[in-house]
């Protein structure tokens, strides 16, 4: 039996209180189970209990067996000297703290059905362990939990954004440009796009924001795509040669050093997703008058925001997928689905983090509202939830479901999940029925 399960029972009083007794058979009345501690030290801080009319205040330590207190060297650690109660399943030994004082130990008695439900979940062969029973819960209860999970997902993404912000000297435009470029690779070319953005600072692009051709020359050239021999058919291609000439001038002016052209991946990609096409679309995106990041922050509705990022590659690419080789003619736009993925994964997280650093609930709330206005994503994870009976109605919900599956279900963190915790305890009353987890995700404007 894992101690984590015992922590869960203790915090929410899912045990028989009449059988929690001291060495003399006196009932131990729990006035406050204490504050749950995931770091080093006792498991619960500042607990309060009453024994034979006397109130005690201090910490609570929980183990499967009493002897674990000594096995874990708590008996020689002064940090545990303020433990007023040692809660165990098996009281197999008297224990003492580093001062030689005996620590009161009491056995926890609970219903076998609660443990059975817990084991059924953690040992379930499906990744979504509760898929056969999740419909037993109130949909509003599930949605409320997903709202917290979405914030947790954005908070995780914020770590990389803040790291990039620090690397760029707190330059939000540069940070936004790098984040945007990174996700423009759509997984397969994420690395190459990151390298390109790092090699070509946004301050250079900003100087040419009114000239699409020059921005394309900067991106293709610094991306190594104008390297001789990379596209054999391009040796007599007028557009390719013009880009090459322009880049020679610009690279000399700004002392640019290209990345290697061989890093780009074309295999197993639909031609419309070739990096040659994506770079042109990125160039088109960066020609926004007034600055892309500023315009993004000014957007107050999803239509305005989407219009900034739903762009078309330059005219050359209407009948090309690579340099020097013609193809069937049609415009290469990003498309609504690709645009929405870019908004979900790159744009909205940066807006949220920007609002967080400015202590602006209004900006944070606007970022969240954008997710609610975007159509639900379609992928294998969302398909798994649909099979379990949960159908998403927006990107806000799909982001929550993706986070729930990857960070909770996959890792069997059922006790930290409000859905799993509720299912395990079904039929048992909670002191806090709206927070049935050991530890809640952080609030939008607090660190986490």
Image (cartoon, rainbow, N blue to C red):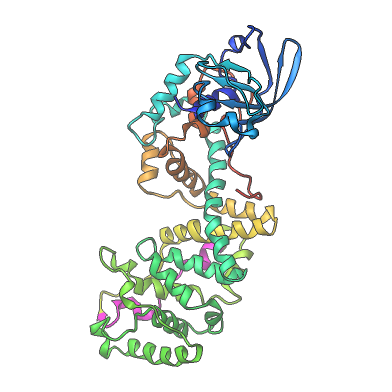
Numbered range of the magenta stretch: 305-325
Seen in the picture, residue 15 relative to 291 is either above or below; the reply is above
- Look at 52% across and 34% down and name the residue there: 416
Seen in the picture, residue 262 relative to 379 is either above or below; the reply is below
Seen in the picture, residue 311 relative to 76 is either above or below; the reply is below
- Look at 39% across and 24% down and name the residue there: 120
Q: Is residue 312 visible?
A: no
Furthest residue in direction top, as rendered: 25
Q: In which quadrant of the rendered image does the N terminus lie?
A: top left
Residue 195 located left or right of residue 287: left
Q: Percent x, y for residue 79? A: 64, 34
Q: Percent x, y for residue 69? A: 54, 26
110 in magenta? no
Residue 208 located left or right of residue 265: right
State the residue in front, 2 or 163.
2
Q: Is residue 240 visible?
A: yes
Q: Percent x, y for residue 121? A: 41, 28
Residue 377 located left or right of residue 425: left
318 in magenta? yes
State the residue in front, 374 or 422.
422
């Amino acid at each position: 039996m894992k101690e984590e399960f015992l922590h869960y029972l203790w915090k929410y009083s899912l045990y028989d209180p009449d059988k929690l007794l001291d060495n003399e058979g006196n009932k131990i009345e729990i006035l406050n189970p204490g504050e749950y501690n995931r770091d080093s030290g006792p498991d619960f801080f500042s607990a309060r209990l009453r024994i034979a009319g006397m109130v005690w205040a201090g910490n609570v330590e929980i183990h499967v067996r009493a002897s674990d207190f000594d096995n874990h060297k708590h008996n020689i650690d002064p940090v545990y000297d303020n433990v007023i109660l040692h809660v165990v399943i098996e009281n197999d030994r008297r224990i003492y703290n580093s001062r030689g004082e005996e620590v009161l130990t009491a056995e926890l008695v609970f219903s076998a059905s609660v443990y059975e439900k817990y084991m059924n979940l953690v040992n379930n062969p499906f990744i979504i362990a509760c898929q056969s029973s999740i419909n037993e819960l109130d949909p509003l209860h599930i949605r409320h939990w997903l709202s917290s999970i979405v914030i947790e997902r954005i908070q995780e993404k914020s770590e990389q954004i803040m790291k990039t912000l620090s690397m760029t000297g707190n330059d939000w435009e540069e940070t936004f440009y790098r984040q945007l470029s990174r996700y423009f690779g759509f997984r397969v070319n994420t690395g190459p796009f990151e390298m390109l953005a790092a090699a070509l600072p946004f301050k250079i692009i900003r100087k040419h924001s009114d000239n699409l051709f020059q921005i394309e020359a900067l991106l293709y050239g610094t991306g190594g795509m104008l390297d001789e021999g990379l596209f054999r058919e391009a040796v007599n291609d007028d557009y390719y040669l013009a880009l090459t000439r322009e880049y020679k001038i610009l690279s000399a002016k700004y002392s640019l050093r290209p990345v290697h052209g061989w890093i780009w991946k074309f295999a197993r990609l639909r031609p419309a997703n070739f990096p040659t096409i994506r770079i042109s679309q990125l160039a088109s995106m960066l020609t926004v008058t007034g600055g892309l990041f500023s315009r993004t922050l000014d957007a107050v509705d999803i239509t305005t925001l989407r219009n900034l990022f739903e762009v078309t590659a330059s005219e050359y690419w209407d009948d090309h997928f690579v340099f020097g080789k013609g193809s069937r003619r049609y415009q290469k736009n990003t498309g609504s689905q690709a645009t929405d993925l870019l908004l979900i994964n790159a744009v909205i997280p940066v807006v949220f983090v920007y609002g967080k650093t400015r202590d602006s609930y209004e900006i944070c709330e606007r970022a969240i509202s954008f997710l609610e206005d975007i159509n639900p994503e379609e992928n294998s994870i969302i398909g798994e939830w649909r099979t379990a009976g949960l159908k998403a109605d927006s990107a806000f919900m799909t982001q929550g479901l993706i986070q729930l599956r990857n960070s909770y279900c996959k890792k069997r963190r059922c006790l930290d999940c409000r859905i799993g915790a509720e299912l395990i305890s079904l039929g048992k009353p909670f002191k806090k029925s709206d927070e049935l987890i050991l530890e809640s995700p952080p609030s939008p404007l607090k660190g986490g």
